[in-house]
Image: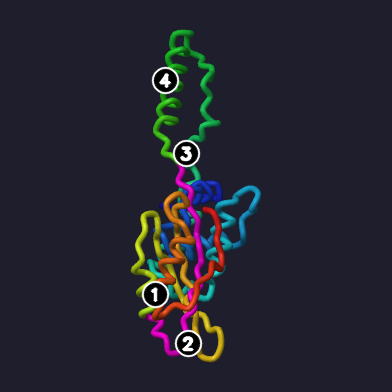
Amino acid sequence: MAFSDLKQLEEHLATRSYIDGYTPSQADVGVYNSVGSAPSASEYPNAARWYKHIASYASEHETLPGDKEASTKLFGGASSSAPAAEDDEDIDLFASDEEDDAEAERLKAERVKEYQAKKAGKAKTIAKSIVTLEVKPWDDETDMKALEDGVRAIEMPGLVWGLSKLVPIGYGINKLQINMVIEDELVSVDELQEKIQELEDYVQSSDVAAMQKL
């Protein structure tokens, strides 16, 4: 897995939240550093969204999991001569050929067949969102590890927990900030918050701090 330009990176991120896996890693950091600056949101919306998201983890880049050295070769390391994946728009169903008419018809028929097979094989795009939840404890004596363990123990189809951190809110109290990726058709954020609220020994309240479609 490597990307020679922003076009390939954009195509990769069209159906993914991160370069590899479901949470930020050194693969994201390596590509982020190689890209250097935020891609154009109008030309590369998925890459721009990803770049902004990884930038929010700047203070954690050094500690994210993964192979730091290998990650530096993920962007710009692919051969520029390698043919790019063919988009539907790039398939010319009526391309001319210098061979005789029979050969031209045969080639055209093959391209039509390839086009139809490609269209039939495309999987339905699954709508996903990345959500950041903030979970507040009762007081500074609340066991935050037990609180987080309780939250992560909640399982729902289409829910994948991500990175988390404790954020000070004053008087020695920290709140849990945790990321997750959800499939929109399967996971109700309201229902998830109700399940979190059932951890009444630890949880005072929960709020959605950020939510973005992928």
Quadrant of the rendered structure where residue 142 is?
bottom left
Q: Position of residue 159 (x, y in %)?
A: 40, 58
> Mark 2 is on which residue type?
Asp
Of 33 and 197, nearer the camera is: 197
> Mark 4 is on which residue type?
Glu
Cα separation between marks 3 and 2: 54 Å
For disc 3, the marked residue is 85
> Mark 1 is on which residue type?
Leu
For disc 1, the marked residue is 199
Secondary structure type for disc 2:
loop
Task: Point out the tag, 1 or 4, that comes first from the N-terminus.
Answer: 4
For disc 2, the marked residue is 139
- Vertical comparison of 26 with 146: above or below: above
What crowding class fits label 3: few (fewer than 14 Cα within 10 Å), some (14-19), or many (20 or more)?
few
Q: Position of residue 117 (x, y in %)?
A: 40, 27
Task: Point out the tag, 3 or 2, that comes first from the N-terminus.
Answer: 3
Position of residue 198 in the picture relative to residue 84 (left or right) = left
Secondary structure type for disc 1:
loop
> Mark 3 is on which residue type?
Ala
Q: Nearer the viewer, mark 1 or mark 3?
A: 1
Task: Point out the tag, 2 or 4, that comes first from the N-terminus.
Answer: 4
